[in-house]
């Protein structure tokens, strides 16, 4: 099992399939993009499936989420999903995507056994989308969301990051849009993970602010029907339920004490936290001929050293050198 020294157990594996993305969201990367990893450094589909198999069959991983960069850019995605869902015990398999291309791929992904998707949608305004993501692709994202719902990848979850002066006026409209379509919306506080290192605490829209923007329009009741457990979102029933909205206060309401995640980057590094400053290199070991036992032992050691919290509030906090797109969000 993947235990750390604070009593937490990692069971939720986030796997980045690529660091490349077809959007340039300002909270993530600069408009010109980044120096992408060369293909030779990316894990192959077989290498990904081998590591995921070790995680699931030997180390107690019960949930696998494919992310990136943009995971739909990996052509082998349906195959990787199908091979993951055939593992025993069968893990939950989900995808975090910007939705571009999902309109075409959702049926194949559902057929491959994908359980759920999280689609990122920060705005419903075409001009704001262009300003925020530097691409004119809002219609593709909305089509992708609808296709995911039609393909049965439910509940379709929507992730939204609000940025001051850009899309922070849209909180109620985003929630209304999702309620009307049966999607479950979660607002995420902006974290210091942008490649440009432009994050400031003053510019971040906090969980308190988000709730204050929604409350005049919707009746929000803390949803205590379910234990929050390790779920990062605080959930609220909207107008008496059953619809819900989530707020993920990663910065102002951290949930590190209940964290059950571990990450694998597209170039085969285990990270025990989004904000970790160290990684453990499984790819080099694997390519040098390491056995499954040896890879599992490295992975166990990497998680054992997980720190108690992300430390954003610590004066000595240092932003990780890799941006979100390269870690896998
Ligand atoms: N490309 C996919 C997508 O857009 O969902 C997957 C990768 S993206 C890095 C995963 C999630 O991280 C998205 O919902 C995105 O909004 C979020 N994200 C990226 N940078 C962030 C930041 N600095 N703070 C908070 N969330 C961020």
Image: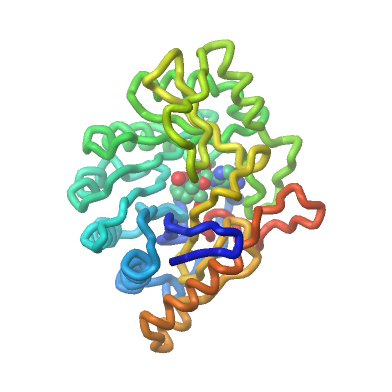
Q: Is residue 11 left or right of residue 305?
A: left
Q: Residue at x 65, y 56 (%)?
A: 308
Q: Position of residue 119 (x, y in %)?
A: 40, 39
Corner quadrant of residue 26: top right
Q: Position of residue 266 (x, y in %)?
A: 45, 65
Q: Position of residue 107 (x, y in %)?
A: 20, 44
Spot the residue most to the right: 315
In the rendered image, is residue 23 in sight?
Answer: no
Spot the residue most to the bottom: 289
Q: Residue at x 63, y 51 (%)?
A: 194
Q: Position of residue 200 (x, y in %)?
A: 74, 42
**How does the figure colour the protein chain or chains?**
rainbow
Q: Total marks drawn?
A: 0
Q: Nearer the viewer, residue 44 or 222?
A: 222
Tell me the quarter of the image containing the N terminus: bottom left
Spot the residue most to the front: 7
In the rendered image, is residue 222 in sight?
Answer: yes
Q: Residue at x 29, y 31 (%)?
A: 146
Q: Residue at x 20, y 49 (%)?
A: 108
Q: Nearer the viewer, residue 93 or 265?
A: 93
Does residue 98 lie above or below 74 as drawn?
A: above
Q: Nearer the viewer, residue 220 or 24?
A: 220
Q: Nearer the viewer, residue 27 or 209?
A: 209
């Amino acid at each position: 099992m993947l235990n750390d020294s604070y009593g937490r157990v990692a069971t939720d594996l986030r796997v980045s399939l690529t660091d490349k993305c077809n959007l340039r969201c300002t909270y993530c990367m600069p408009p010109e993009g980044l120096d992408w990893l060369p293909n030779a450094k990316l894990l192959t589909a077989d290498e990904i499936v081998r590591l995921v198999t070790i995680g699931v069959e030997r180390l107690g991983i019960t949930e696998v989420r494919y992310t990136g960069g943009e995971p739909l850019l990996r052509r082998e995605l349906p195959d990787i999903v199908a091979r993951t869902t055939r593992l025993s015990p069968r893990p939950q398999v989900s995808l975090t995507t910007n939705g571009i291309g999902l309109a075409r791929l959702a049926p194949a992904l559902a057929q491959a056994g994908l359980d759920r998707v999280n689609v990122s949608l920060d705005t419903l305004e075409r001009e704001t989308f262009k300003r925020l993501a530097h691409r004119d692709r809002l219609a593709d994202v909305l089509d992708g969301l609808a296709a995911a719902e039609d393909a049965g990848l439910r509940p379709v979850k929507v992730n939204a990051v609000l940025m001051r002066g850009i899309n922070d006026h849209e909180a109620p409209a985003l929630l209304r849009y999702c309620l009307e379509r049966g999607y479950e919306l979660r607002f995420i506080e902006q974290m210091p993970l942008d490649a440009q290192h432009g994050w400031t605490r003053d510019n971040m829209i906090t969980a308190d602010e988000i709730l204050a923007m929604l409350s005049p329009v919707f009746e929000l009741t803390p949803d205590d029907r379910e234990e929050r457990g390790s779920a990062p979102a605080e959930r609220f029933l909207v107008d008496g339920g059953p619809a819900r909205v989530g707020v993920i206060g990663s910065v102002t309401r951290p949930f590190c004490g209940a964290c059950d995640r571990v990450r694998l980057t597209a170039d085969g590094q285990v990270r025990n936290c989004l904000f970790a400053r160290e990684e453990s290199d499984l790819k080099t070991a694997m390519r040098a001929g390491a056995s499954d036992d040896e890879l599992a032992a490295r992975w166990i050691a990497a998680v054992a050293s997980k720190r108690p919290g992300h430390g954003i509030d610590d004066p000595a906090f240092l932003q990780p050198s890799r941006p979100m797109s390269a870690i896998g969000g």
